[in-house]
Image: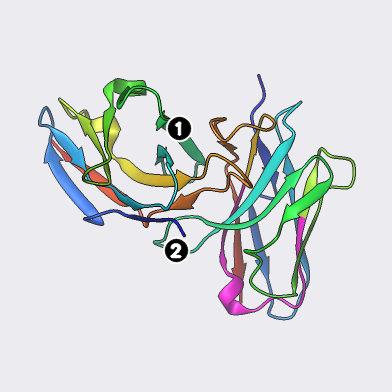
Amino acid sequence: AQSVTQLGSHVSVSEGALVLLRCNYSSSVPPYLFWYVQYPNQGLQLLLKYTSAATLVKGINGFEAEFKKSETSFHLTKPSAHMSDAAEYFCAVSRPSGTYKYIFGTGTRLKVLA
Amino acid sequence: GAGVSQSPRYKVAKRGQDVALRCDPISGHVSLFWYQQALGQGPEFLTYFQNEAQLDKSGLPSDRFFAERPEGSVSTLKIQRTQQEDSAVYLCASSRPGQGTDTQYFGPGTRLTVL
């Protein structure tokens, strides 16, 4: 079975500070991993994905994530937070075969302080 | 191009009513997924279609939930005899065929409130 744990349901950072959102996964097979962002009353938008190529993945809006198999982690980072980054962020895992359904974490709401 | 669209965006139903939620996937996307997102939670998988075939319905919470995609394009999620615990946002996603690496593109969701 696969699962995702996102530590910290709420994270606050100052504008210009480092953003770090944590995601740990559990999977019996090599996983595919995703980070999505959700703005209020909108659908989920893909930030980046790991699909067994490079372990450091760069996404949109300056975000990146590093796949660390030894730590079963896929943390999301951004060097400098912008006010527009305030949103909810979801980490998801899927299998490389079968249904390809996503298993999501419970989400982390990011607040950016002026 | 056009993304995934869902209608209605908001639905209020009285307990016991039947509802139907529509999803229009991105043109040419063979795979279609439905997820349920309860308040304050991450989306949870409901069901998956490849073309018109429903290949996985393991996430449907009860036999009151039914999904179809008769022509391999538009999909409808039907909930019969709605209950208060069915209140959630229902998300539809589509992707290109066959590869787990393919991104799922999500619609804006339908927020269902059961009174």
- Of B11 and B81, nearer the camera is B81
Q: Which residues are magenta?
A: B77-92
Give the percent coordinates (x, y) of residue A81. Answer: 18, 30
Query: Label 2 is found on which chain of the structure?
Result: B
Give the percent coordinates (x, y) of residue A83. Answer: 23, 32
> Is residue B87 part of the magenta span, yes or no?
yes
Residue B89 sits in quarter: bottom right
Q: Which residue is mark 2?
A: B39
Residue A46 placement, left or right of B20: left
**Label placed on residue A46:** 1
Residue occupying image coordinates x 28% and y 26%: A63
Mark 1 lies on a secondary structure that is strand
Mark 2 lies on a secondary structure that is loop
Give the percent coordinates (x, y) of residue B76. Answer: 78, 52
How crowded pointer 2 is (Cα within 10 Å; few <14, some 14-19, many 20+) is rated as few
Residue occupying image coordinates x 84% and y 39%: B72
| Amino acid on which the number 2 mark rests in the picture | Leu
Of marks 1 and 2, the one in the foreground: 1
